[in-house]
Image (cartoon, grey):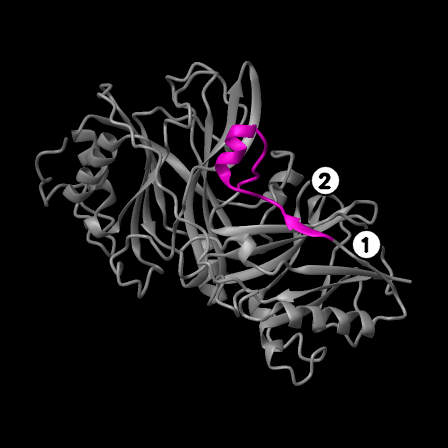
Amino acid sequence: MVKKKLDSNSSVVNCVTKSGGEIKAFKEALIFDNFEITAVEFFLADPIDLYNKKIITSCNGNNAGNPYYTFKVPTPTTQTIENPLEGMAFYLCADEAIVLVGLTPPKAKYFSYKSFVFSIKKEGTLYKTYTSLGDTINLMNINTMDLPDGNNPFSMPVIIVTTADKGINARVQAAAEVAGYDRKIMNTDIIPSAIAKMGLDADCDTFSYLNRTAMFENLSDGEEYQNNSGVVAFRVTPKTTPELDPYPTPTMRIRGTGLTEMDLMLMETVDQLRKAILDRYATYTSDELITEVWLREGYEYIQTLKDGIGVSRDTSYLRTTSFKLPDSPNDFLIVYGVNHAATNKCTYANFITYSKEILNGVACVNSDQFTKSAESFLPGNPMAKYLYVWKIARQSSDDDKENCLKVPMDDFANGIPLSEEMFIGFRAYVEPKTQIGPAWQELIFDRVVKFSK
């Protein structure tokens, strides 16, 4: 454990952040405490680009238009096995940590940080699980200089320690404090070692990490963050193996408030909206698609060894049944339902078009765009402000361009070819009262009707 403060005249004192801390002084304090430090790349990951380059085999249901950052962790020299997933996933020992130091994203509807178990080895077989290891550190619960009053979690200094061990976390945070960082900005991203098998052996689990962001208030600020986040990340490994003091599996936040959108008397209005839509397009053949729960809780995927494609507890995930969409003005979909952000069941919501095969999100509409979109179907209805209507097509006509989402037909992951089946996915991120994704049973499910002639 670090026992003394570093000399303030030391040559390593630089890189001062808003919290008063110094990156090099932080690293020196860790070295003083007998840690080895390895640089980790914190980079902007584009799932579509990674798929097109054949680095990944699926786009993992990417939230289209919303950036992801992740870690690229070099393989340590002590690791005797190859990591075929290097750049996407990494091995981590129970006495190690990955440390992130920098500023949070600029003002946005949402951001979060979380570790995932990417793959699990069982009886010689490698299973991709890519599932969350519990609750995220998000904009509503993160420790920064301005919290816990919650006034401004944006562009604020932050330290996040990803580790399974209480003692390692305490030593890392003590070193940060020695370097001048305020305890108020320190956060722990816990990997529960009772669930995850840690180590550098072939039968150990691999991990990954995501910093999610969505809907920057100022596009130029968002672009600047994406081009230069200013975040520093590194791996710390004790030179002497300590006695482990593992974290227990954290208690998770409970989804739901007991107040459903049905309680808000919206079900009857949604049914009225359905009738108005069918009446407007009465000359077309209609096929009402089924909407169901798409992704469930992360720990289910660990137990069933199925692919959670980066599931987060900060949102609900719904999806429709699959279909094909021809390139014709007589073939289109109408998406409609409750604007969950307007009912305060989430911070923001969206719907996205996906290819069934590679799960590439290529076109998106978010809840900020939903305003007044249902009023022409329900003129004078005071509940219309809580609803939305949108068209999805391969091409749009002059009279529907404003509320029409075009699905590109590009090959690879940039579009959805006409020969491919697709579906619509729905998200509703972070219910303000719970600081976690809404319970799907408290939502009126979004609906889709496919029209054709």
Q: Secondary structure at mark 1?
A: loop
x%, y% of residue 373? 66, 74
Q: Which residues are magenta?
A: 290-310
Mark 1, residue position:
325
**Left or right: 15 with respect to 338?**
left
Q: Pick whichever, 147 or 317, lies toward us.
A: 317
The disc labelled 2 sits on which kind of residue? Glu
Q: Pick whichever, 178 or 252, lies toward us.
A: 252
Residue 415 in sight: no
The disc labelled 1 sits on which kind of residue? Leu
First-in-chain label (2 vs 1): 1
x%, y% of residue 21? 21, 49
Q: How many numbered discs?
A: 2
Image quadrant occupied by the N terminus: top left
Mark 2, residue position:
357
Q: Pick whichever, 425 or 418, lies toward us.
A: 425
x%, y% of residue 239? 24, 21
Residue depicted at x 48% and y 35%:
299
Residue depicted at x 43% and y 14%:
80
x%, y% of residue 176? 20, 42
**Left or right: 109 with respect to 95?**
right
**Left or right: 435 with respect to 285?**
left
Residue 267 in sight: yes
Residue depicted at x 25% and y 44%:
23
